[in-house]
Amino acid sequence: MNSDEIRSRFLKFFENRGHKIIPSASLVTSDEKGITNPTLFNSAGMQPLIPYLLGKPHPLGNRLCDVQKCVRTVDIDGVGDNTHVTFFEMLGNWSLGDPKSPDGVGQGYFKKEAINWSYEFLTSKKEGLGLDPNRLYVTVFEGDQNAPKDNEAGEIWKKIFEEKGIKGERVFFMSEESNWWQAGDNGPCGPDSEMFYDVLNKFGGKGMTKSQFIFADEKRDVVEIWNDVFMQYEKENGKIIGKLKANNIDTGAGLERLAMMLENVDNIYDTDLFKSEMNKIKENSENFDLKPARIVADHLRTSVFLIAEGVLPSNTDRGYVLRRLLRRAIRFGKQLGLQEKIYSELVEVIAEKYKNIYSNILENVGMIQEEINKETEKFGKTLEKGTREFEKGVDPFILFTSYGFPLELILEMAKEKGVTVNVEKFNADMKNHQDISRVGAEQKFKGGLAGTGEMETKYHTATHLLDAALRKVLGNHVFQKGSNINTERTRFDFSHPAKMTDPEKKKVEELVNDIIKKDLPVVRQEMKIEDAKKSGAIGVFDDKYGEVVSIYTVGDPNGDYFSKEFCGGPHVTHTGILGHFKIIKEEAVAQGVRRIKAILE
């Protein structure tokens, strides 16, 4: 049974039991009011449903089921083993305080119904997955000072196993760490019950002791495949204050792990979800190695899904996660000897796999390929140089600012080499970089800068982009003749003999906004003035410089860059935070000198 059939069987099973099928929410989390501290991405099936689990009525009723796309990078170091991935699909069914049990009487849809349906779907050959019930083991909450032992769930499971004639110890009471769910110190919470499966039938359908089970779990001889959460308590300031007015059920089963069981393989990467991608990587590897190949396959698949939903590589928030995944994939791809063109081909393989499930990938293949190719080209050029510098023991701050190595990648490389990185020093250097020239900069660089606050700093960097864009559109005769920057706009004077045409102004705007959208780093370097000139840096009209100057580069100082200038003023660390650039006026100042006024929206 492949992944497509698992999805369809799951949804049909619960639809036949009164559940409404809802579509997967976006990977990008909602900013809806009332959701506190949202994560960057949906990382569990229940996450998009938090408002409804807290009592908001759902338009489709109180029994729901879906297949939710999820991204979770907390276990990124484990990717490449048998079971860990960063993108996965979570099968889930919910009761949002459903007052009725299936027979119309009793306490409602809660532990008994959820547990029985979980077992039935996993083991039924007719409607479910037909897994061997003798290879199934479960855990329930053992109780602590906050909540009692979950004897109810334990007894339901024991009764199921007894009635089915499944012998041996199967039900293990475990601590809060493994069998308690909560969204935080405040809100709904409760015990849960996890189901584990003996993947390769190592235990021959026999029971085991609790200590044997814990050891088997640690060794991944048994793998968690399903979790039933029983939301029945409410917490306030970290303490349980009572029971909820209505009980909720939240269940989740990972599609990738279920596919592993159903396809009788011992790892996720040998399932149909990854097989085509892994084969493509193997065929194109000069020196194939299993773990790096799995990392490339996983990270690229996740990146494809993120870009399809509008996330683009950047140095902040969601874009940074994407950039980290792509750059990590590129690094391991280099180890495998993969050529850059392979990434575009892998995008097509992934799109083909999901074309009938998530059509937005197939619809956006070209755009996804373009974004991945840009990132591959950008990082690929500096990867070798940066790696060589890393081998020499270069400061991680330089690797981050000059070569675009994310800190996590630097830490990973250091761990592989058995060396440590001074993260505190890195953070201090970054803060210094961000605050550069905020103290005393006014004495070093006036140039029309009214102050060194946040908006002046943004406009100052935007003025560099404007200068570079004008030279690209109008020609290298353009030089800065003066500027005036405040919190509301930039005013820039430059050499040019004629009034700019509307198409020229539009092209300049497009160039600047394209660089902002690309979220390029703004890198500061110090060097002797002769070396600075040789590097291609240009000076700002009449300013006098000392023997050593500060150079600010927008882009890669050692590769492709958009702007490189002598400057002593404050700058943002990356262009993506500038906003939208717009020219509001272009006029003459003197013979051969024009003036532009522009704003950031």
Image (tube, grey):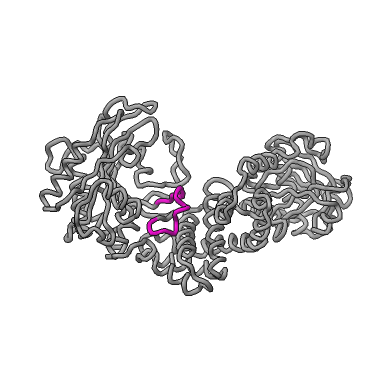
Left or right: 261 with respect to 560? left
Q: Position of residue 195 (x, y in %)?
A: 26, 49
Q: Residue at x 17, y 57 (%)?
A: 124
- Where 484 falls versus 410 (above or below)? above
Q: Residue at x 35, y 27 (%)?
A: 239
Name the residue nearer the viewer: 555 or 584: 555
Quadrant of res 600: top right
Name the residue nearer the viewer: 364 or 552: 552
Let me know if residue 521 appears in the view: yes
Q: Position of residue 273 (x, y in %)?
A: 37, 63
Q: Position of residue 561 (x, y in %)?
A: 71, 57
Q: Is 78 in the magenta?
A: yes
Q: Residue at x 38, y 36 (%)?
A: 183
- Where 26 falls versus 189 (above or below)? below
Q: Position of residue 279 (x, y in %)?
A: 43, 71
Q: If the image is split into quadrants, where does the N terminus sit?
A: bottom left
Left or right: 113 with respect to 522? left
Let me know if residue 62 appears in the view: no
Magenta residues: mostly which secondary structure?
A: loop
Q: If the image is split into quadrants, where does the C terminus sit?
A: top right
Q: Residue furthest top?
A: 241
Name the residue nearer the viewer: 66 or 222: 222
Q: Is 289 in the magenta?
A: no
Q: Residue at x 78, y 57 (%)?
A: 471
Name the residue nearer the viewer: 21 or 130: 130
Provide the residue span drawn in magenta.
70-83
The mark tally for this picture is: 0
